[in-house]
Image: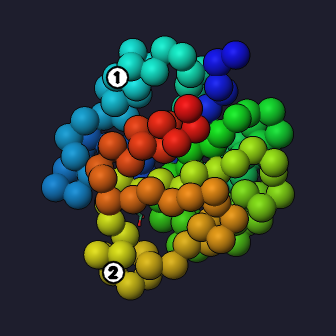
């Protein structure tokens, strides 16, 4: 059976392609996602983005007991949200935390993650390829 995987993106990631392209690249997320769908036809891939913390928590709860994997880039909420960290702890679906940039090479406030302690693994710093490596980790 096809693995059910979802990519959940947090705040400002809807601006990929036009947001700080020197940090985040010039591809839009939809362009990248289409490439992943074409390449990983043996997986059932979906994605969700919200700028709202509670909507991200709702989505994690909704998919967190029946999906095979969650690829989570909580963006800035990674560094601030006890609620998202608790949601990741509450569910049974394994979560791989992903970041496009190497957060450890950036400002100190990006060095802490509320998600990592309850994640299956963390992949960061490889640009959009970080998401692809996370997909591969579930296949
Ligand atoms: C990010 C890193 C975060 O620190 C930042 O707030 C983001 C994107 C990344 O993918 O590199 O919005 O999660």
Tag on residue 107? 2
Residue farthest to the bottom? 108
Q: Is residue 31 left or right of residue 116?
A: left
Q: Find residue 71 and name its label.
A: none
Mark 2 Cα within 10 Å, few/some/many (few <14, many 20+)?
few
Which residue is tagged 1? 35
In the rendered image, the vertical position of residue 126 relative to residue 135, given as above or below: below
Location of ligand 1 given as a quarter of the image: bottom left
Q: Which residue is drawn at the image coordinates 39% and 59% (left, top)?
A: 124
Q: Position of residue 137 (x, y in %)?
A: 52, 42
Q: Quadrant of residue 97?
A: bottom right
Work out whether mark 2 precedes mark 1 in sequence or the reverse, and give the earlier one.
1
How far apart are labels 2 and 1 at the CA level? 31 Å
Image-based side of 27 in relation to 1, left or right: left
* Location of residue 23 in the rendering, given as x and y in whole percent from the top left corner: 23, 58
Can residue 88 be seen here?
Answer: yes
Left or right: 1 as drawn, with respect to 80: right
Residue lying at 83% horizontally and 39% vertically, measured from the top left: 65
Q: Is residue 79 left or right of residue 14?
A: right
Could you tell me residue 42's position as x and y percent? 54, 16
Q: In x, y percent, where is residue 76?
A: 48, 65
Against 13, is 111 above or below?
below
Task: Say few, some or many: other residues with alpha carbon within 10 Å of mark 1 (under 14 / 14 to 19 / 20 or more).
Answer: few
Of badges 2 and 1, the one in the foreground is 1
The kind of secondary structure element at disc 1 is helix
The answer to which image quadrant residue 15 occupies is top left
Residue 78 sits in which quadrant?
Answer: bottom right
Asked whether mark 1 lies closer than 8 Å to ligand 1, one says: no
């Amino acid at each position: 059976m096809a693995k059910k995987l979802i990519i959940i993106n947090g705040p400002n990631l809807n601006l990929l392609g036009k947001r700080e392209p020197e940090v985040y690249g010039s591809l839009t997320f939809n362009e990248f996602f289409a490439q992943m769908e074409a390449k990983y036809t043996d997986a059932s891939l979906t994605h969700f983005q919200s700028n709202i913390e509670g909507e991200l928590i709702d989505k994690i709860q909704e998919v967190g007991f029946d999906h095979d994997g969650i690829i989570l880039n909580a963006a800035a909420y990674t560094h601030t949200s006890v609620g998202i960290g608790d949601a990741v702890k509450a569910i049974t679906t394994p979560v791989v935390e992903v970041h496009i940039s190497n957060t450890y090479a950036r400002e100190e406030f990006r060095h802490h993650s509320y998600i990592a302690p309850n994640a299956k693994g963390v992949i960061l710093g490889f640009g959009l390829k970080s998401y692809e490596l996370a997909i591969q980790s579930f296949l």
